[in-house]
Amino acid sequence: MKNKILIQITLGLIGIFLYNACDYISPPYTQGTHSGPDTSIVMRKILIEDYTGHTCPNCPRAAEMLDTLISIYGSQIVPIALHVSDYARPEIHPDSSYNKDYRTVTGTDWDNEFQVSLVGLPHGLVSRLDHGTSSFIKSYSEWSTASASIASLAADVKLTIQNSYNTSTRVITSTVNSEFVNSLTGTYMLTIVLTEDSIIDWQKDGITSPPTNLQFFVHKHMLRGSLNGSWGDTVATGDIAKGALWTRPYTYTLPTNFNDTHCKIVAFIYNSATYEVIQAEFKGIR
């Protein structure tokens, strides 16, 4: 009997020791130090600008490449399809095909500055890497390698977007928060644009000769307008301290012919000297 009591006391003491010796972490489990700040790494996202047009017969291949990269990297890819140049110019057809004008002021400004369409479509930019070199404008076959080169990098800035949408007035209020998670030097700009997905319309496809006229092509990630101009606002300049914050709301009235369930706000920060995009983000308006 005494031995049994002694065993029970011993087991109890062991249990108390183990309880006090171990930290208990209750769910949900998060990355970071126990009882300390969250130390999770903010990953750099990849802005891909697809310069395209509805009468460009090779452009569907670039759209397919963009779909492939999204299937690999998911939301780390931030896509924008810009309809530019004569390939996006409306044409008069008896059947009313190709009569929509999907060009935008911002897309035209970017194309005039970077001269992507002069190289020929389809081409594009990947986070605007390599500006000032022959590698700046990239064919769609080069997007994968360029994306892989930055996909595992930690970001210098954390971007968050908060959208509020009034379905009656169709006014979007988008508040973008920029937090510098590392100290930097330079001038950094924030550009905010609107894209629309799943627009069904005509597209030439050069998979056949002569090209096929696709009546029900799904145009994705289409640039539709800007909330703060083609080149954006200055968010920080000079010696920028780690933890520096910049927050500002923007408004945009959605045209009635835009489908609000398919529209997204896209925000990105770039170095004004090199144009390189150091972080990007997107979020649906509803």
Image: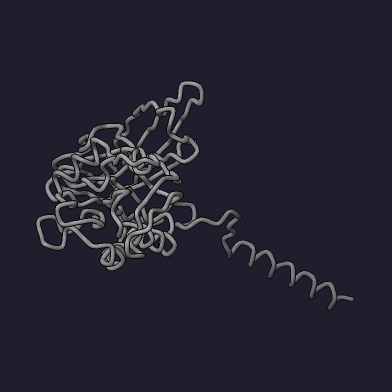
In the visual, does 166 lie left or right of 175?
right
In the visual, does 180 lie left or right of 254?
left
Residue 137 lies in what quarter of the image?
bottom left
Nearer to me, 207 or 4? 207
User: Looking at this rendering, what residue extends furthest in the right direction?
Assistant: 1
Q: Vertically, is 228 above or below 55?
A: above
Nearer to me, 69 or 236? 69
Nearer to me, 119 or 278? 119
Q: Vertically, is 285 above or below 113?
A: above
Give residue 277's position: percent from left, percent from top: 24, 50
The answer to whether residue 121 is visible is yes
**Residue at image location 35% in from the left, 42% down from the top:** 266
Q: Vertically, is 106 above or below 53?
A: above
Task: Tell me how the rendering is colored.
Answer: one colour
Tally the marks: 0
User: Looking at this rendering, what residue extends furthest in the bottom direction?
Assistant: 3
**Residue at image location 30% in from the left, 63% down from the top:** 147
Give residue 135's position: percent from left, percent from top: 15, 63
Residue 243 lies in what quarter of the image?
top left
**Residue at image location 24% in from the left, 45% down from the top:** 84
Give residue 1's position: percent from left, percent from top: 90, 76
**Residue at image location 20% in from the left, 39% down from the top:** 236
User: Looking at this rendering, what residue extends furthest in the top direction?
Assistant: 169
The answer to whether residue 181 is visible is no
Q: Vertically, is 220 above or below 229?
A: below
Give residue 272's position: percent from left, percent from top: 15, 44
